[in-house]
Amino acid sequence: MKQIELITDGACIGNPGPGGWACVLRFGKHTKEMFGCETQTTNNRMELTAAIRGLAALNEPCEVTITTDSEYVKNGITQWIHGWKRKGWVKADKSPVLNRDLWIALDEQVTRHTTKWQWTKGHAEHADNNRCDELATRAAREQSSSE
């Protein structure tokens, strides 16, 4: 299996508000940057979208190391999702899981690949995470200025 690095980030101007997502895919010497935006969204939705879009861009099953600065995404997909699915998509406090549509989409993408999730501190010394932040923020600002 190909070994891929996927670095992700999301941004939002206001929360909710115009948002952007971005990811960097690395395979050997090859690098691909992807980003996009939504008019009315939340930061968590953009963080999830970045991971979904990055994984969906892979045409075959791969071993993917996913780096995110979102503990919400990392913990959600590696820990919390199992209980959510078992309990019918409700949290421990019996309230519905927020962003269920995106969690389902991310879960579908994760099952296609062998994944390893790692967290990095945002706005720190991870060059690809900083690049994703730059792209996601730019996409959110461009969306904001077009409204």
Image (cartoon, helix red, strand yellow):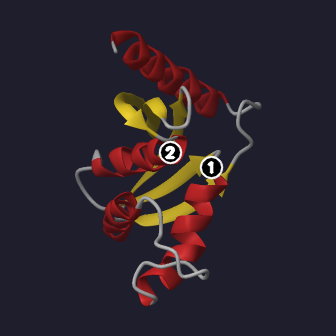
Tag 2 secondary structure: helix
Q: Percent x, y for residue 24?
A: 46, 34
Quadrant that contains the C terminus = top left
- Identify which residue is drawn at 55% across, 63% down: 116
Q: Percent x, y for residue 66?
A: 53, 52
Q: What's the residue type where badge 2 is placed?
A: Glu
Disc sitting over residue 70 in the figure: 1
Looking at the image, residue 134 lies above or below residue 29: above
Image position of 122 (left or right of 54): right
Quarter where residue 111 is shown: bottom left
Q: Percent x, y for residue 138?
A: 48, 17
Question: Local crowd at mark 1 within 10 Å, few (<14), some, or many (≥20)?
Answer: many
The answer to whether residue 29 is seen in the rendering is no
- Identify which residue is drawn at 70% across, 46% down: 120
Q: What's the residue type where badge 1 is placed?
A: Ser
Tag 1 secondary structure: loop
| Closest to the observer, 11 or 50 | 11
Q: Which residue lies furthest to the top in this view?
A: 145
Disc sitting over residue 144 in the figure: none
Looking at the image, residue 92 lies above or below residue 110: below
Q: For mark 2, what is the residue?
A: 47
Quadrant that contains the N terminus = bottom left
Question: Local crowd at mark 2 within 10 Å, few (<14), some, or many (≥20)?
Answer: many
- Identify which residue is drawn at 34% across, 67% down: 104
- Identify which residue is drawn at 50% across, 37% down: 16
Q: Earlier in the sequence, mark 1 or mark 2?
A: 2
Q: Percent x, y for residue 124?
A: 76, 32
Determine contact: label 1, label 2, CB under 8 Å.
Answer: yes
Looking at the image, residue 24 lies above or below residue 111: above
Q: Distance between the residues labelled 1 and 2?
A: 7 Å
